[in-house]
Image: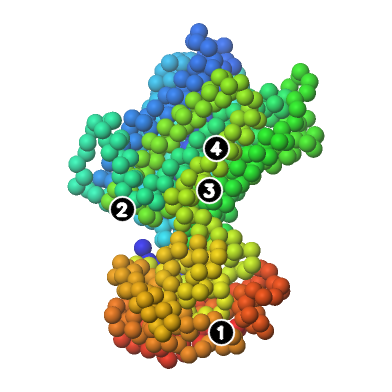
């Protein structure tokens, strides 16, 4: 889908006014809310209501309920992925929502007549219904949103989901305590199931990417086959593993919240609910901030930032959990009167915020880099692995808390340390994540980068970018602003600089040197440029061949014409504005030989109209870049 100019500047919340997104958002929001009203209402009644006792222990029933809800994700995700790839998605969503209405009507009857085992069976069916919805939910987003909207759309979905979970959990807890609680719960789940179906009627058509797909029904074989789809692309598979690891962490924290509140904070259920609320708000806030921090593109640099925050504040939670005192449990009001407790709440909120930074770019990356004809099956593999990791998280809790007798704060420290190990493993295999993180840190601490008309860079196919060369940071600023990966042609002494060399190597930068000084590097550079263009990549050159020493744009060399003679591709002129005089420029003295005079200064990257290869000449392109730059150096 071609990106228009509006997506560069408008807020993600504008999507909530558009039919291509808003009906889908409310459909999934109401579904997540209803799931949690039903599930948590049932578990609360089993725990606290005499009318819902079965003779089986509360812990056993709660674990059974959680298991029955997760089990369908193992059993039916492969089928759900095939259905979402084979059939039109909006119709499939409506069928799934009709199934929800049927389940909720039966649930209302079971709530009214106190049929616990019937409700348990329906909980399994609710899990199955959620399993069918999952692949459609994430694979329809890239069909309706432009590339520059993927992060914002996923952020809204993730934040909405966690807010819905929170509201649904609180609603279930409150209503289940009423005298007529079972009846009210039954009525509520029917009403919201119907509202979800009504919202789904407005979802635009999502064409089937693979209507000729032959359905296969062997659960175990197809589950394995579905996971194999995700392994075809190494970066996608590592992103999926990262997503599943997040659900391992999330399940570990959320499962322990009630015991942590009671045992370590001496709090009653209202304290646990408050902590759940602050965690969910943190996830929502972090998710929504992703778009602002990523500049309307998929910014993988936020993923390591999220990992760092998850570990730092997980450790801080261990060090600042107050010693429990007294025998009487305190309410949330009493809990908030003690200033020492605010550190715990802040840690839980920031774990949520950095979790949002971590998870949203990964979902968007999977959507963007997956082949469309089996994208839904790749999403289904996420559900399978998420469920597996959540089960493993329960086993880990049993091991550390039960067998090894660790305290819950000790367990939180173990999770933080495990996160460091997992993150290090992922980023060592795919250094692109850490490379993007370094670019993001540099370009967001030293500069405020505004970009204009970058939509003029083609969304697909090869292109040659030509830009003025002002500072050592030029390539990083361009790489951080452009949605597509860019292959830079870099003067070899700059390419070899410490720290920057890691970024350049990871970003597949092409080193070049003067033909007279290093003819081998010179020829190899043009060979690689040609190969990258033939592979459909975007290549950026600085035709001046060196950093400016005067602030003016020097003569453009004829290397650009040599490139176009061999590979005639579209040429896009670009200009950097505001970098002259920065620490990394040659103004007044050599770059990086004086103390920095400014931080977070305003910089702009602007793109011009594409130029046909047969018209692009060095002198003419210099004039275009000069016009784009204007007087602001």
* Mark 3, residue position: 358
Q: Residue at x 65, y 30 (%)?
A: 409
Residue 559 appears at what percent x and percent y? 38, 84
Q: Is mark 2 on a helix, strand or loop?
A: helix
Mark toward the start of the polypeptide (2 vs 4): 2
Between the residue at mark 3 and the residue at mark 1, the CA separation in whole angstroms equals: 38 Å
Query: What element does badge 1 sit on?
Result: loop
* 269 lies above or below 491: above
Q: Mark 4 points at which residue?
A: 418
Mark 2 lies on residue:
372
| Residue 9 visible in the snapshot | no
Tell me the distance, in whole angstroms, between the alpha carbons under discs 2 and 4.
34 Å
CA neighbours of label 2 inside 10 A, class few (<14), some (14 to 19), many (20+) = some
Callout 3: SS: helix
Q: How far apart are marks 4 and 1 (CA)?
A: 47 Å
Report x, y in % for residue 239. 43, 47
In the image: residue 585, left or right of residue 430: right
Q: Which residue is drawn at 48% across and 45% down?
A: 425
Whether the residues at callouts 3 and 2 have beta carbons within 8 Å, the answer is no
Label disc, if present, on residue 235 of the rendered structure: none
Q: Are marks 1 and 2 in contact (CB under 8 Å)?
A: no
Q: Secondary structure under badge 4?
A: helix
Depicted 450 relative to depicted 202: above or below: below
Based on the displayed image, in which of its 4 quarters is residue 108 positioned?
Answer: top left
User: Would you call the spot at circle 3 few (<14 residues within 10 Å), some (14-19), or many (20 or more)?
Assistant: many
Q: x and y percent of residue 144 in the render?
A: 38, 56
Mark 4 or mark 3, whichever is nearer to me: 4
- Which mark's residue is nearer the viewer, 1 or 2? 1
Which of marks 3 and 4 precedes in the sequence?
A: 3
Q: Which of marks 4 and 1 is nearer the N terminus?
A: 4
Circle 1 sits on which residue?
548
């Amino acid at each position: 889908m071609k990106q228009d100019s509006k997506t560069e500047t408008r807020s993600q919340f504008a999507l909530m006014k558009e039919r291509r997104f808003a009906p889908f958002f409310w459909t999934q929001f109401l579904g997540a809310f209803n799931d949690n009203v039903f599930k948590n209402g049932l578990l609360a009644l089993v725990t606290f209501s005499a009318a819902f006792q079965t003779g089986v222990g509360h812990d056993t029933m709660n674990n059974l309920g959680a298991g029955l809800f997760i089990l369908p994700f193992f059993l039916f995700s492969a089928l759900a992925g095939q259905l979402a790839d084979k059939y039109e998605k909006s119709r499939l969503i409506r069928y799934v929502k009709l199934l929800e209405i049927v389940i909720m009507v039966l649930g209302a009857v079971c709530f009214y007549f106190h049929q616990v085992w019937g409700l348990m069976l329906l909980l399994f069916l609710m899990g199955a219904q959620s399993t069918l919805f999952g692949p459609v939910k994430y694979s329809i987003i890239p069909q309706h949103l432009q590339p520059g909207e993927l992060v914002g759309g996923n952020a809204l979905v993730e934040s909405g989901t966690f807010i819905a979970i929170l509201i649904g959990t609180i609603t279930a807890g409150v209503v289940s305590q009423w005298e007529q609680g079972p009846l009210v719960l039954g009525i509520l789940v029917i009403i919201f199931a119907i509202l979800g179906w009504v919202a789904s009627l407005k979802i635009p058509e999502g064409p089937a990417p693979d209507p000729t797909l032959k359905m296969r029904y062997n659960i175990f074989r197809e589950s394995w086959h579905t996971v194999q789809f995700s392994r075809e692309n190494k970066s996608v598979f590592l992103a999926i593993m990262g997503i599943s690891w997040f659900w391992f962490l999330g399940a570990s924290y959320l499962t322990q919240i009630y015991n942590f509140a009671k045992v370590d904070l001496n709090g009653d259920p209202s304290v646990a609910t408050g902590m759940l609320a602050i965690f969910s708000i943190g996830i929502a806030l972090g998710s929504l901030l992703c778009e602002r921090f990523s500049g309307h593109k998929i910014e993988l640099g936020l993923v390591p930032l999220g990992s760092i925050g998850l570990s730092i504040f997980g450790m801080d939670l261990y060090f600042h959990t107050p010693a429990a005192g007294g025998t009487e449990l305190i309410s949330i009001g009493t809990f908030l009167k003690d200033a020492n407790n605010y550190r715990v709440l802040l840690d839980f909120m920031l774990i949520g915020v950095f979790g949002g930074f971590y998870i949203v770019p990964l979902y968007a990356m999977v959507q963007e880099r997956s082949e469309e004809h089996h994208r839904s099956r790749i999403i289904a593999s996420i559900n399978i692995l998420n469920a597996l990791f959540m089960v493993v998280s329960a086993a880990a809790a049993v091991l550390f808390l039960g067998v090894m007798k660790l305290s819950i704060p000790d367990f939180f420290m173990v999770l933080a340390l495990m996160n460091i190990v997992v993150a290090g493993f992922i980023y060592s295999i795919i250094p692109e994540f850490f490379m993007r993180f370094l670019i993001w840190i540099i370009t967001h601490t030293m500069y405020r980068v505004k970009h204009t008309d970058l939509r003029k860079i083609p969304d697909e196919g090869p292109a040659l970018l030509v830009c003025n060369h002002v500072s050592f940071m030029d390539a990083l600023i361009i790489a951080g602003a452009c949605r597509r990966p860019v292959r830079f042609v870099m003067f070899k002494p700059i390419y070899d600089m410490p720290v920057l060399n890691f970024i350049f190597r990871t970003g597949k930068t092409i080193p070049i040197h003067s033909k007279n000084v290093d003819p081998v590097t010179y020829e190899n550079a043009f060979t690689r440029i040609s190969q990258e263009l033939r592979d459909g990549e975007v290549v950026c050159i600085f035709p001046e061949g060196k950093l400016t020493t005067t602030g003016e744009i020097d003569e453009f060399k004829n290397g650009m014409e040599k490139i176009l003679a061999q590979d005639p591709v579209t040429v896009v002129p670009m200009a950097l504005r505001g970098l002259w005089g920065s620490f990394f420029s040659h103004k007044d003295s050599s770059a990086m030989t004086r103390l920095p005079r400014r931080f977070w200064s305003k910089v702009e990257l602007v793109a011009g109209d594409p130029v046909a290869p047969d018209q692009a000449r060095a002198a003419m392109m210099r004039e275009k870049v000069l016009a784009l730059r204007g007087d602001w150096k």
